[in-house]
Image (cartoon, rainbow, N blue to C red):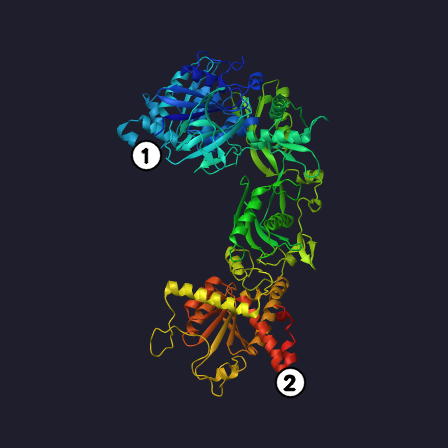
Amino acid sequence: MSTILNIGILAHVDAGKTTLSESLLYEAGTLRTIGRVDHGDAFLDTFELEKERGITIFSKQARLQAFDRQITLIDTPGHIDFSPETERTLQVLDAAILVISASDGVNAQVRTLWYLLEHYKVPTFIFVNKMDQPGMDMDTISDHLSQSLGNAVVNMSPGLSDPNVCESIAVCEESLLERYLNDGQITDSDVTNLISKRLLFPCYYGSALKSEGVKDFLENLCKYAPTGSYPENFGARIYKISRDDDGTRLSFLKITGGSLSIRDTFGDEKISQIRLYSGSKFEQVQTASAGTICAIAGLAQTRAGDGLGFEASNHEELLEPILNCRILLPDNEDPYKVWQNLLILQEEEPMLSVSKAEDSVDIYVRVMGQVQMEVLKRLMQERFGMDIDFGQGRIIYKETIASSVEGVGHFEPLRHYAEVHLMLEPTGPGTGLTFEANCPTDLLARNWQRLVLTHLEEKKHKGVLTGSDITDMKITLIAGKAHIKHTEGGDFRKATYRAVRQGLMMADSVLLEPVYKYELIVPKDNVGRAMTDLSSMSATVSSPSIEDGKTVLRGTIPAACLGNYAEDVRSYTSGEGSLSCVLKGYAPCHNSEEVISERSYDPELDTHNPCGSVFCSHGVGTVIPWNEVRNYMHIDTGWRPKGDNTPLPSDIATEYDTDSLMSFKARSSSDEGPDTRSFSEKERDYRAGQDELMAIFEKTYGPIKNRNNNNNDDTPRTYGVPDDKPKGISDPKYDEKRDAKALRKAEGYKEYLLIDGYNILFASEDLKSLAERDINAARDKLIDIVSNFQGFRREIIILVFDAYKVHGGSEKVLKYHNLNVIYTKEAETADQYIERTSHELSKNYKVTVATSDGIEQVIILGSGGIRMPAKEFWAEVKNTEKQIREEHIETGESKLHNYVLKDSDLFRNS
């Protein structure tokens, strides 16, 4: 257990947070005198701007030793414009002190801080400040805190010797209450345990300015505050990036495991300094142990939220800016240099989100409010000598979708190829964007899938209503296709971006606007005016409540409608009213049509974010519009937009679900480009592949024995014609295909060829192209081709199609001319039928299975069958057609020749 204690101190503006920090440092002996914010000599207000404005802008730390505990105290900003920095600090705290002004009570900013502390699971102590002001009553304030923050807030000023305090603590946990009723005791470890689990929030009262109650608070803080235990392996969490007066880049972090030393390396970078800061001064050390908060120099690529060692990075934040402002520059300022310097400030405050317009040199930043703008202007002047100003801030809108949709993107100019299918699904308010892959690797290799996810995450995708960022949706990669020769990494970037945009164009998009939670306090005489104003601003209003003789109104209000209403409140209430607001999140825009019209964004004219796809036609890249592109896709996942009655393949469900989609993908073959091998090379590769599969199988399961061997020996089974040749054949090199009829008459000998219908169908480019328009026509064409093929083959061919998604369907066996066609029953796939049938037939006959399903091929080998990949099957079809021509020409059977070739254009090109 570490003796190091990292405490953060949080409060709303003017609650006395920095004053309490000064008093704690004084009581611990770190300071000889207490500084004051209004005098500009506070120990932790180290920047001139902070001294001038009397507010904390940047988080700072101080080190103190008290009651055998080494404490690092982190003072955080209290103004709402700098709340994101406060949020980042919470991730490295062991506990927090929430300072509440006795006169202000629990206002909207306190509720926001309470929500952040709950989200990051930070154990919390409460100090009610300014109790020296007239009219402050401890019991009244305690009741107010319990009503606002919960009954777990317990006034512990009297200590554990007070039975009322012990009872209040005991009811916080059922097991503790049961024990307390038996023995009547509450121990210090009980209190610490409850605090660490956030079941108890000790509350103390005093005056930081007069140091009343501060020493007792510090003693109880050191007694009850939980400290962490850390693993031996190294880990660290970076929460802040800053620069000292000399321009040295510093990464502030907490070591969460192991230790950190000078000259430790991370990638190609090495730590050059480890600093322990206290105010503006620091001490350099060679090594820092687990639990220490320090600043390190030497790392140039770190960001706030990064994790080192075993810690995972986390850059997500709950609070975010709502204003987007254009930077106004004098004529003598270089936009590029301004851009570079703003990026430096963005390292220190990531929420700035510095961006440049794609079609101009305009620079934009995102800010929380007016105070942050003034601070940025001052920083640019003091650190870089640049004068900047801000244009009118525009509300940052966002976009989401109302229902699920499949987005498709294709990028195929000459010698490039990539196709991406994404499922876009709404996930609810405040969930942000999430990305995942649910695509079989036999459809798209894992490396391409990872690349697609990278492209999804690397870009802020724009919506199609106003060009605003999209949010609150899950984007899943469900299908994709690459070319073995022509696909490059950049191709998937283009296809991915286009798939997102095409999906958004098809979806029912929803415009979102930022919404504040507000608390409006006005005298009773002004309630009517306040209610009227709120209604005109499209605000929601809860039932009014009376507190301290004033009316309190709470609800939500669109940020775009708020304006300077806080000043209006002070004006019409003669200074007796107040308005406090905190950002709640995003909600559907109250005047979306007006905003969309005002923004005048046309997604089809946005050349930087195209919605259509590029296909190769006659060697030239052709752009297909987003609303037509689905008809040209090389993959059909089975998803259809509402109202689209295009027939689906029989093995694809009529509604999108993962199982049917995976089944479809498993039978879809990826395009491996034209095969330029000679026939002898194909034969060699085929035999090598067959031997390799056989070797793998026999190594795992043992050799395949001859089930028909009457001598019951271990001679491996041989495949081909039987030992007893048909009579009349004397040539040892006789042509098996020319004597197919004679072989079939051989007593007791049969050969079967089982064909996985959809797998073979989608291995043919022509049939696949036809299937994209009409799957039924493609299936019928395949049946015709195989029927012609059967007419000249010795095998008994069985063509199997999936019908396992047909509700209530039973197995059907159809006789099409000379061909057996099987449609499987409900809940049985073609794979399962073929595996079952081949297992039975191979006991007595030679069985070959035409499929490219790798798992199925291994199972077929285990059943004693022979595999025939889809490419080899189509090569056999083509070779058979050639032999048909030759034989019919030789025999003069031109009539039969015309019959066979009548419908052979398609398989001639396969």
Q: Position of residue 191 (x, y in %)?
A: 35, 27
Q: Nearer the viewer, mark 1 or mark 2?
A: 2
Q: Say left or right for 665 vs 466.
A: left
Dot 1 lies on which element? helix
Q: Position of residue 699 (x, y in %)?
A: 38, 63
**CB of mark 1 within 8 Å of CB of mark 2?**
no
- The answer to whether residue 677 of the structure is visible from this angle is yes
Q: Residues within 10 Å of mark 2 (few under 14, many from 20)?
A: few
Q: Amino acid at mark 1?
A: Ser
- Counting every numbered tag in the picture gives 2
Q: Position of residue 498 (x, y in %)?
A: 63, 49
The residue labelled by disc 2 is 892
Asked whether 752 or 176 is in front, the reply is 752
User: In the rendered view of the protein, which quadrant contains the N terminus?
Assistant: top left
Compute the Cα span from label 1 to label 2.
98 Å
User: In the rendered view of the protein, which quadrant contains the C terminus?
Assistant: bottom right
Dot 2 lies on which element? loop
The residue labelled by disc 1 is 175
Outermost residue on the right side: it is: 331
Q: Amino acid at mark 2?
A: Gly
- The answer to whether residue 824 of the structure is visible from this angle is no
Q: Quadrant of residue 374?
A: top right
Q: Quadrant of residue 256?
A: top left
Placement of 794 over or under 578, stated as above or below:
below
Q: Position of residue 62 (x, y in %)?
A: 45, 21
Asked whether 493 or 510 is in front, the reply is 493
Q: Residues within 10 Å of mark 1 (few under 14, many from 20)?
A: few
